[in-house]
Amino acid sequence: MRPRLGPTLGVLIASLACAPSPATSVEPTAAGAGVEASASPERRSVRPGVNDRYFEDGAVERWTDTLERERREVIALRDPIVAALELEPGMVVADIGAGTGAFMSALSAGVGETGTVYAVDIVPAFLDHLRARAETEGLTKVEVVEATPTAVGLADASVDLMFMCDVYHHIEYPSVYVRSLYEALRPEGRLIIVEFDRIPGETSAKMMKHVRQDQATLVAEVTAEGFVLEREIEDVPFDENYMLVFRK
Ligand SMILES: C[S@@+](CC[C@H](N)C(=O)[O-])C[C@H]1O[C@@H](n2cnc3c(N)ncnc32)[C@H](O)[C@@H]1O
């Protein structure tokens, strides 16, 4: 299990005032089409090209293999992760960056017949796959939603809980996108983020390169858009990830 954070939340939050600002880069990617190159800094991609591989031919098959392999940490820990979401029948839950749908069935079971699961992604082939998979698996409460890199595509104040699993480092425009998440949450709604650690000396070189932000940077970015960090979930035995609960 990874070592837990030492500081209390208060100390952690106070320390965020000194957190480095996220790296900004210059050009939007194809996936960010429609975002002007001359736009304000918050409308410039912080990680151009990070989603390009998802748009390639054959991505559904390739990424199903990669994202749903049993030895992937969040798949091995899928049950305790979903239990930690504290789902209740009737809830409206959004799986932000649903990918190939690894969590779709478990989320559907958690909200029951009276709930709704929005499976949200930006990749058209994933969206088609999610629709087909929901039908095949009889997940009648799943609605597939197309986001853009800058907006989640959900109605204002329409969701009780947003879940993002290993997605945050794929968000190219964190400031405007997180604001759109905030607007789509109901008052008192929760945003729960599972994300890769990025700890020099502990995280692999590959993941240090792939994941742009560390935990403090993520928290600083998310709280800058109005969310309040409520707690870190400590009882899921992660080695490579952490899990944070934010409140609107
Ligand atoms: C590493 S995959 C994780 C998929 C899934 N959450 C899982 O854990 O299996 C990242 C996903 O985020 C999606 N994504 C990237 N930017 C997004 C955005 N702005 N809004 C919604 N989904 C996005 C990608 O298309 C991809 O499906």
Image: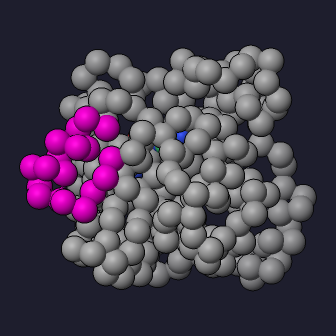
Q: Position of residue 100 (x, y in %)?
A: 29, 43
| Quadrant in which ligand 1 is drawn | top left
Q: Is residue 246 visible?
A: yes
Residue 30 placement: quadrant:
top right
Q: Is residue 209 left or right of residue 78?
A: right
| Residue at 51%, 45% in the rendered image | 153
Q: Is residue 129 left or right of residue 53?
A: left
Q: Magenta segment: does it hold 138?
A: yes
Q: Residue furthest right?
A: 18
Residue 15 placement: quadrant:
bottom right
Residue 42 placement: quadrant:
top right
Q: Is residue 240 visible?
A: no
| Residue at 64%, 31% in the rendered image | 47
How many numbered circles are shown?
0
Q: Is residue 150 left or right of residue 108?
A: right
Q: Position of residue 178 (x, y in %)?
A: 65, 51
Q: Quadrant of the C terminus?
A: bottom right
Question: Is residue 194 shown above or below 136?
Answer: below
Judging depth in this view, the residue of 232 and 32 nearest the camera is 32
Q: Position of residue 106 (x, y in %)?
A: 26, 67
Judging depth in this view, the residue of 137 and 155 nearest the camera is 155
Judging depth in this view, the residue of 10 and 36 nearest the camera is 36
Look at the image and name its color scheme: one colour
Q: Position of residue 96 (x, y in %)?
A: 46, 52
Judging depth in this view, the residue of 20 and 171 nearest the camera is 171
| Residue at 17%, 46% in the rendered image | 133
| Residue at 87%, 72% in the rendered image | 14
Q: Magenta segment: does it hold 25?
A: no
Q: Is residue 122 left or right of residue 75?
A: right
Q: Which residues are magenta?
A: 127-144
